[in-house]
Amino acid sequence: MYKKMLVPLDGSELAEITLVYAREVARKLHLSLVLLHVYSPAEAEHVPEQQAYIDGNVDTLRRELKKETGLTVQGELAEGYPAEEILRYAEQNSVDFILMSTHGRTGIKLWTMGSVADKVLRASSVPVWLVRAGASPEDIYYKLPTRKLLVLLDGSELAESVLPHVETLAKQQGSDMVDIILLGVCELTPVGVYYYATVPIDWEDYIARCKLEDKQYLDNIEKRLKSAGLKAHPELLTGKPADAIIDYASKNPVNLIVMSTHGRSGLGRWVYGSVAEKILHGTSTPIFLVRPH
């Protein structure tokens, strides 16, 4: 069960899209929030202003969440490099996941939020919930009467590391209110295509076998989740994984995409890191990324 989320802020309006979104996530999952601002040693003389910035946001969220019993909102300041301090705080304070924007300030002495998010994602031992800067909370959260989680799976144990988190996300929101979509993609142009120049491939047979194997795999995952009391159904696509997933999300609006940062590798497998990056840039849907241990 999730209890606490960490929300890093850099002082920009772009980063503060996470405040509205974090408020709603806190309500739906009944979570306590920690707002963290990291300043550099060169900004130490402006600590009072930094503190006022955090205190103001904490006060606003406390007022907005005052009817939610048991929830707490606190603010923290830290001096140092943003990514390092975010990771340090999460590790030392029992944070369940980090919710942050993909972009924020730019310029000298200011965070480049995209770079910070990337560094946090690569090293975090807890999931990172990314909200694309400029996305509208109303569009991505409120308009769907049922919460829809799009779970990306490629058949690997690494990709399946998201499943315990999927169960937790669904149960804390109310199992009856959440639909889980298990999405697999049969890749039409597998990695290592140069290999096929000397080894003939029957592509129709390859796709048929891929669909059969992936369907059986997704059906088994569906049974696993249903046995846990959750609503789930599989969807199977063909094409380039990132393109197929982005197209599906644009035509079938979902509240959250859940995926691992790594999955299969080798011939005919997804290159998961690049898929995650393309999806992040290709959709406004928030993404819950899990880094397998």
Image (cartoon, helix red, strand yellow):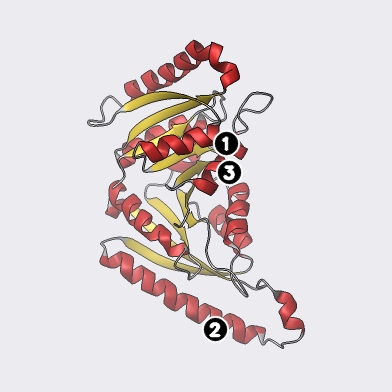
Q: Position of residue 232 (x, y in %)?
A: 36, 63
Report crowding for label 1: few under 14, some 14 to 19, many 20 or more residues within 10 A (C-alpha): many
Q: In percent of the image, x 62 and y 57: which residue is there?
A: 274
Among the 4 quarters of the image, the one containing residue 21: top left
Q: Nearer the viewer, mark 1 or mark 3?
A: 3
Q: Please state the horizontal and vertical placement of residue 4, each as a whole percent of the image.
A: 33, 38
Residue 25 horizontal/vertical position (percent) = 38, 39
Name the element at disc 3: helix
**Which residue is found at the position 65% from the left and 73% from the top?**
190
Q: Which residue is mark 3?
A: 118
Mark 2 crowdedness (10 Å alpha carbons): few <14, some 14-19, many ≥20: few
Distance from the alpha carbon under mark 2 to that under mark 1: 40 Å
Determine crowd level at label 3: few under 14, some 14-19, many 20+ residues with C-alpha closer than 10 A.
Answer: few
Q: Is residue 194 visible?
A: yes
Q: Amino acid at mark 2?
A: Arg
Marked residue nearer the N-terminal end (3 or 2): 3
Q: Earlier in the sequence, mark 1 or mark 3?
A: 3
Residue that carries the numbered disc 1 in the rendered image: 133
Question: Considering only vertical position in the picture, is 270 above or below 83?
Answer: below
Residue at mark 2: 209
Instruction: Find numbered disc 1 in the image and state the secondary structure of the residue it sits on.
Output: loop
